[in-house]
């Protein structure tokens, strides 16, 4: 077994992915967080394709937004706007094995403020 799968986050993510699945009506909101950036995708697992995606790279006012938590909240609002434009209201939140606090929590709050239900 490689060291990649010994990573505790990967183990937690695989365990939650065994229970979560996105459909066309209720896609999976998958989050990826690195040390500098955060990105999110709406994924239809049945068709195996990404419906829409958002990242902090897409924000125009990235420098003025300031702190990483504020950037994550803005990314959540951005993905919610894209999803609502495509007619998606409800999603399944996949935190990717990350703890639900800090940037992950801010992204979820931003998505809820943008109109998504999960």
Image (cartoon, rainbow, N blue to C red):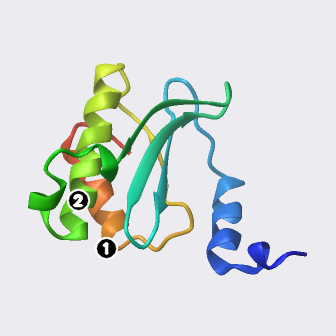
**Residue 4 relative to residue 65: left or right:** right
Disc 1 designates what residue? 102
Asked if 83 appears above or below 41 in the picture, the reply is above
Indicate the secondary structure of the residue bearing disc 2.
Answer: helix
Q: Which mark is residue 71?
A: 2
Question: Helix or strand or loop: what does disc 1 sit on?
Answer: loop
Give the percent coordinates (x, y) of residue 26: 49, 32
- Is residue 116 at least partly visible in the picture? no
Where is residue 88? Give x, y as percent.
Answer: 38, 26
Q: Quadrant of residue 2?
A: bottom right
Gap in angstroms between the C-alphas marked 2 and 1: 11 Å
Q: Would residue 38 be found to the left or right of residue 109 on screen?
A: right
Residue placed farthest to the left in the image? 64
Q: Residue at x 15, y 60 (%)?
A: 63
Image spot of residue 1 (x, y percent): 90, 75
Q: Is residue 22 left or right of residue 98?
A: right
Q: Quadrant of the C terminus?
A: top left
Residue drawn at x 63%, y 42% as measured from the top left: 21
Q: Nearer the viewer, residue 105 or 34?
A: 34
Q: Is residue 114 above or below residue 1?
A: above
Counting the numbered discs, the total is 2
Residue shown at 70% from the left, 62% from the top: 14
In the rendered structure, the answer to whether residue 67 lies left or right of residue 116 reads left
Task: Mark 2 vs mark 1: give the one in front.
Answer: 2
Q: Nearer the viewer, residue 108 or 57?
A: 57
């Amino acid at each position: 077994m490689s060291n990649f799968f010994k990573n505790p986050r990967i183990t937690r993510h695989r365990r939650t992915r065994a229970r979560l699945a996105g459909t066309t009506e209720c896609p999976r909101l998958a989050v990826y967080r690195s040390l500098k950036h955060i990105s999110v995708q709406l994924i239809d697992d049945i068709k195996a394709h990404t419906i829409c995606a958002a990242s902090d790279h897409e924000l125009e006012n990235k420098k003025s937004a300031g702190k990483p938590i504020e950037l994550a909240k803005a990314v959540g609002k951005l993905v919610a706007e894209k999803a609502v434009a495509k007619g998606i209201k409800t999603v399944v939140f996949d935190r990717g094995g990350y703890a639900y606090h800090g940037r992950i929590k801010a992204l979820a709050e931003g998505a809820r403020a943008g109109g998504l239900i999960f």
